[in-house]
Amino acid sequence: MNVKQFIKKHRDDWKQLEQLVAAMHKRKKNVTGANIDQFYRLYQKAAQNLSYSQTYFPKEEVTFYLNGLVSKSHNVLYKDQMSSMNQVRHFFTATFIRLLWEQWKFVVAALVLFTIGAAGSYISVLQDPQNMYAILPPEMAYGVDPDSLGSSDGGHWDSSVMSASIMTNNIQVAILAFAGGVTFGLLTVYVLIYNGIVIGALAALFWTHGKSYEFWAYILPHGMIELTAIFIAGGAGLLMGYKLFVPGHFSRGYQLKVNAKRSVQLLLGTVPLFVIAGIIEGFITPAPIPLEAKYIVAFATVLGLICYFIIGKRLFLREL
């Protein structure tokens, strides 16, 4: 049996299970004992289909679809036992991590696009610093002064306001990168490359002024978490764009429905990362502490991200 035959044979059962999951999730009044019996039967059959698909079609879209359907069905079984806090915990320790590992190629693609933009602008400004004025927005190009970096450390400002402002801006970038998926990913590609261009141009400018060590000390503490979150959001947009561009065995409307939900979940998973990055950028980055301490914070954030992704993967694998 090939993948097309497999989908055609079981597609109606999967759709029925989706409808029952939605009805039970919303606690509709028309959910009867017969519906529940049918739900259990279809859930068990979908689990068997998932096992078969993982064995014979491990890289096909249908396997990821079934994995999500079985997970949603499983969650419905234990919905009454889960408190709101447990649901939040389950999302960040299982659902989000599972989606991230399933769609890691799109996250890497977002990283590559960002790197292309950064490398291009870095080389351009390195060859001729005047190119910065053609690359960066005027307010940024004329407003940055490498020699004044760190001069306001410890000054008087409302760090909580700064942190909130920075966090809001970064979340807006992530939402734009995610929403660009509906343009077949074209807007997402632009956002990722453009943000890479900005970072690359600034890095080259500070290098020409002999301020690279200081520049990265102010970027990396919050930047490692911030960029990771943007890459995940960008990956969510690329996922949606790719599935619209290459719908495979399903219609584009169906792919939009299924993958928009996955992408939204990936985007929601980045919110705590942006909160942490905003706090670091508002309170730690401008603090009058040694540059070495800021690099230590950056290293700690990378270590924390690695631990979160690895431990999270083990947790969701344990639930399978």
Image (cartoon, grey):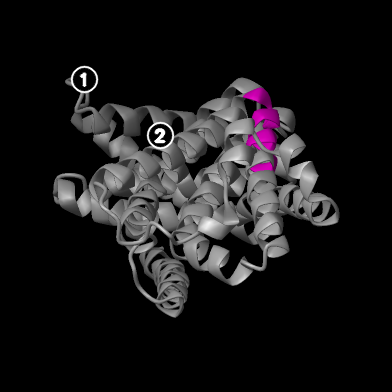
Q: Is residue 189 magenta?
A: yes
> Can residue 89 be seen from the camera position used here?
yes
**Residue tagged 2:** 17
Q: Position of residue 20 (x, y in %)?
A: 33, 30
Name the one closer to the observer, 315 or 241.
241
- Residue at image x 61%, y 43%? 62
Query: Which quadrant of the structure image shows residue 52?
Result: bottom right
Q: Is the magenta stretch mostly helix, strand or loop?
A: helix
Q: Does the magenta stretch include residue 210?
A: no
Image-based side of 33 in relation to 99, left or right: left
How many numbered marks appear? Answer: 2
Q: Which of marks 2 and 1 is nearer the N terminus?
A: 2
- Residue at image x 74%, y 33%? 246
Residue 263 vertical position relative to residue 118 in the rendered view, above or below: above
Q: Where is residue 217 in the image (x, y as percent from the top left)?
A: 50, 68
Q: Where is residue 192 in the image (x, y as percent from the top left)?
A: 64, 42
Query: Which quadrant of the structure image shows residue 79?
Result: top left
Name the one closer to the observer, 224 or 198.
198
Q: Residue 256 carries which label?
A: none
Residue 292 vertical position relative to residue 101 in the rendered view, above or below: below
Q: How far, Cα to Cα, is label 2 from label 1? A: 15 Å
Image-based side of 311 in relation to 242, left or right: left
Name the one closer to the observer, 151 or 320.
151
**Residue tagged 1:** 30
Q: What range is drawn magenta here?
A: 183-193
